[in-house]
Image (cartoon, helix red, strand yellow):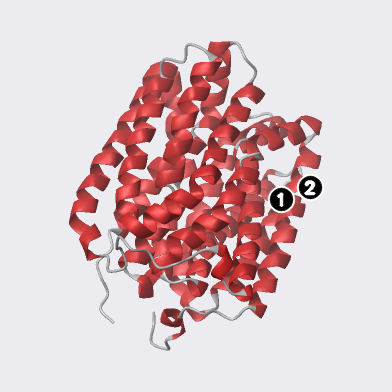
Amino acid sequence: MKHRRVPVHSLGISQIISFGLLFYAFAQLKTPLAQSTGVNETMILAAVSGALVIQGVLALVIGQWIDRFGGLYIMQGGFLIGAIGLGLLSFYPSFVWICACLVLIGVSYAMCTYEVAFGSAVQLDEPKARRNISIITFYGGIASTVTWMSVAPMLEFLGLQMTCLCLAGLMLFGAWRFWVLSQRYQQEVPQISKTLEPFRWSILTQSEKRVLVTMGSISTLGFLTFTATSMFWINLFSEKFADPALAVVLASLYGPFQVVGRLIEMKFGHRFDARLSGIVATMLMPLALTMIHSDAVEIAVLAMILFGMGQGVLTVTYGFVTNLYFRASVYGRAKGMMIAPRAVIAAMGPSLGGVLYAQGADQFLYVMAGLMLVAMLLMTSLLRLPPTNEIHLQPNNP
């Protein structure tokens, strides 16, 4: 089978920008935004949660758009909308204004983060989907580190308004880049047509429905944990070790070791069933969350390494295991069905995390670990459902 070129590195770099500016940045923006509008940080986090809900509301529609028009076109629009949202956020005259900007940011998040990038990779070269998804997530793994290390000095030296405008400029660059890519690559996608292959819940087999429900549940639990913890690592380590600089370093370990996990997946993953990789990943995360209870810095370092590696591999699992069961021509809509409930529930992560964290860091960590243990059991249950996508059943497929 002929392999088509995939702009995989551009797709990867786009995830540093989109995840970094549309999500991770608010771990640091929340405080100055709250201070500038006279509300508490919990209200800002609730607004961020609301923005994430939009991904769930739009998931089915965007999944259909991916299958019909191609992921590269969708990402072009997503980056443009994100640039507008962040640009308007720089004015921050009131909490209502911030909420309105976050609506645009939520729409952008739904249109230019992992699920759409994965859809593009699967459409452009389905046989190499696992490797290409691994490369995309390799870049995404450093989004938190790059963002947190960049936004802090920007806020200090430029202030909130100029920081938001700079972030908007980066999103605008992303929109231009995907306009170029869509002109260059999208015509090569053979699956795209105005007449979509039928794909709806009522015509799916019982096995396909079980895969969608199981993967949707795993993804929901994992993303809920991800969104909740991402907003509080810096707070948690600052309080535990009374050293804000050390807290940023510890929190930032998460990103590079996501990359390490994905490098291991890229190098050795093809030797193993992707579902087994997912089971190992979901085992590492509750172990790491339990270890963070320790007051030793060395244990905190090891815990963040394990947590990052687990999250890194799990993100690849989300993207590729779906393709084990659903072909490229319906991949966007299959992911849409999984994402819709996940995004709505997982969007509660920042606000739920705030409520739990207010009760104490220990309770917060125990609940997060419990969620990932359930995810591990669900991932194990997938081993009873044999893959059905014939492209990945071919013995010579990489």
Left or right of 255: which side holds 196?
Answer: left
Q: Nearer the viewer, residue 175 or 147?
A: 175
2 and 1 marks in contact (CB < 8 Å) = yes
Quadrant in which the N terminus is drawn: bottom left
Instruction: Name the residue carrying label 2.
Output: 366
- Residue at image point 35% right, 54% down: 71
- Say what secondary structure mark 2 lies in: helix
Quadrant for residue 108, please give it. Answer: top left
Label 2 or label 1, whichever lies nearer to me, is 2
- Residue 295, position in %: x, y? 76, 42
Q: Three-letter amino acid code at disc 1?
A: Leu
Picture disc at residue 133: none
**Quadrant assignment for the C terminus:** bottom left
Q: Nearer the viewer, residue 368 or 96?
A: 96
- The residue to which callout 1 is attached is 289
**Which quadrant of the view contains residue 211?**
bottom right
Depth check: 80 or 305 in front?
80
